[in-house]
Amino acid sequence: MIISLSLFLFSCQMGRSDYMSQEQRNEIEGAYDSLQTTYTALLAEYKSSTDTLPSQLSDLYSQMQNMHSEMDVSHRQMLSGNLGRHMQGNNMMAEGMGMHMQGHMTGEWYSQMMGMHKQMAQMHQTIGQQSMARMNQRLSGEYGNMRRMIPRLDEPTELPFNEEGDPALLNGENLFSQNCASCHGGNAEGVSGVFPPLVNSKWVTGDKSIPIRILLQGLQGEIDVQGQTYQGIMPSFKARLSAAEIASILNYLRDQNQGDFSEITQDDVIRVSKNTSERTRPWTASELNQITDE
């Protein structure tokens, strides 16, 4: 079944020149060219070391390439001024999003790549592969610098939603695979010491607003999951997912956990989004631990 998304027209945000100047665009393009040089060198290192990579790193290397390709599409749309398109289930829908939203989407991708390369750098450091550790750490820093170049990321955006959307009509498992499995694994069991598991995790099964907040604004810093401490960056998905898609993913994950957990509705996501609409920075675990009810 095709579910139509509402068209969002953000006045004062549609024109390229109003959102990003040519000087800003040139600055990001120059930084991206430098990043691509480092990324190409890293790929060459990986290709020459395929037989010696631990299985976890080999899997992340493959996922990193897929994420880079997705990020590149969003990056080029932002610089060209093309408005993004959005996947709702198996159907591609035009969103009519403004360039401000496209900038936030690309910023989310930069954050995700920054976190991925940071974690890979730590893994290479642990096993003594210093050259690849340095290149991954450099890429993480370059993505962070590029994110800071995107204008108006400190301004909040609206959450895309369809008033008649029904998360139950979407495929939460597919949406999880498309958006989350690259870091948390296809079975949502994570990567030990690198990316936390999402099964049997209080961060997924607790108060509804907590996992909603994490997907809306992201999570950064130290977090304990199943007795293990993780340190990293979980990006926001607010610009990349609709309210119904967020609910669908979270309901899929809650179903994978042991126990009977209440269903998250699109209205739940919209309510939390409105209550946290001014927040543009990631949450910390300590902040989320203080939340008892939304």
Image (cartoon, grey):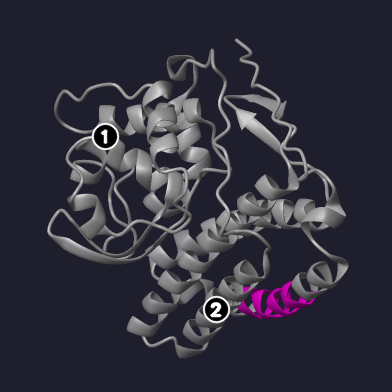
Callout 1 touching callout 2 (CB < 8 Å): no
In the displayed structure, 115 sits above or below 34; it is above
Q: Main secondary structure of the magenta part?
A: helix
Q: Quadrant of residue 223?
A: bottom left
Q: Is residue 32 magenta?
A: yes
> Residue 280: image x %, image y %?
48, 55
Foreground pick, 283 / 84: 283
Say which amino acid is labelled 2: Gly
What residue is shown at x 38% (from left), y 35% (from top)? 272
> Residue 160: image x %, image y %?
58, 32
Q: Quadrant of the N terminus?
A: top right
Q: Which residues are magenta?
A: 30-43
In the displayed structure, 103 sits above or below 56; it is above
Q: Quadrant of the C terminus?
A: top left
What residue is shown at x 47% (from left), y 15% (from top)? 166
Visible in this render: residue 187? no
Write down the residue under mark 2. 141
What residue is shown at x 52% (from left), y 64% (from top)? 61
Badge 1 density bin: few <14, some 14–19, many ≥20, Cα 10 Å: few
Visible in this render: residue 267? yes
Q: Earlier in the sequence, mark 1 or mark 2?
A: 2
Query: Is residue 10 rendered to the left or right of residue 123?
Result: right
Write down the residue under mark 1. 294
In the displayed structure, 291 sits above or below 194; it is above
Q: Secondary structure at mark 2?
A: helix
In the displayed structure, 81 sits above or below 175; it is below
